[in-house]
Image (cartoon, rainbow, N blue to C red):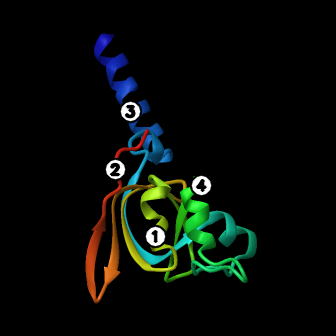
Amino acid sequence: MLKAKSTVGSLLVLWMASYSPTILSADKPVSVEGTLVDSKCYLKDNSLTGNDHGPMKQCGAMCLKAGTPAGVLAKDKKFHAIIAPSTALAEHVGEKVRVNGSLHNGSILADKVEVSKDGKWEEVKLGAMM
C-alpha cells in the first residue's frame, strides 16, 4: 500500500510539473542586448530612448540617479525592466548594453551588465543590491 501511495504521489508531482513549469523553475537564464533606457520616461512616451528628453538634458540619468528603474529596449523592441541598482547604470542611458541574468515575468534580475565602448564590452560595476 505504501509503495502505491508513493507512486501516485510521484505521478502527481510529475503531472503538476508538466502543466506548471514555474513549479520547477522560477527563472530563465537570459542575455539581452539593446538600448539602456529610463523606464519611467520610456514607458510614458514609448519613444524616449536617449538620455536627453526634449529640453531636459540628462533626464534619463537624473531619473535613474533618483531611483527610477532602468530598462533595456531589445532589438526586437521588447522592453525589459532591469533589476539592479539604477544609480550604477545612470551614466549609460541611451547607450548599447548587454544584460545577463535571469528572466522573471519579463524583468531581468541582472547578474552582469556591460556597455559597448569602441566595439568592446565593458562591465558596469553594479555594487550590492539592498
Which three-letter amino acid code belongs to the residue tagged 4?
Ala
Point out residue 12 in the picture as x, y percentages from the top left corner.
Answer: 43, 31
- Relative to residue 16, is residue 86 depicted above or below? below
Q: In the picture, which quadrant includes the N terminus?
A: top left
Q: How far apart are marks 3 and 1 (CA)?
A: 52 Å
Nearer to the camera, 31 or 62? 62
Please give the label number shown on residue 66. 4
Q: Which of marks 2 and 3 is nearer the N terminus?
A: 3
Residue position for label 3: 11
Q: How far apart are marks 4 and 3 (CA)?
A: 51 Å
The structure residue drawn at horizontal position 39% and vertical position 25%, both measured from the top left corner, is 8
Which three-letter amino acid code belongs to the residue tagged 2?
Gly
Please give the label number shown on residue 91. 1
Q: Residue furthest top?
A: 1
Q: Distance between the residues labelled 1 and 2?
A: 15 Å
Which three-letter amino acid code belongs to the residue tagged 3?
Leu
Point out residue 67 in the picture as x, y percentages from the top left corner.
Answer: 57, 52
The structure residue drawn at horizontal position 46% and vertical position 70%, both measured from the top left corner, is 91
Please give the label number shown on residue 52. none
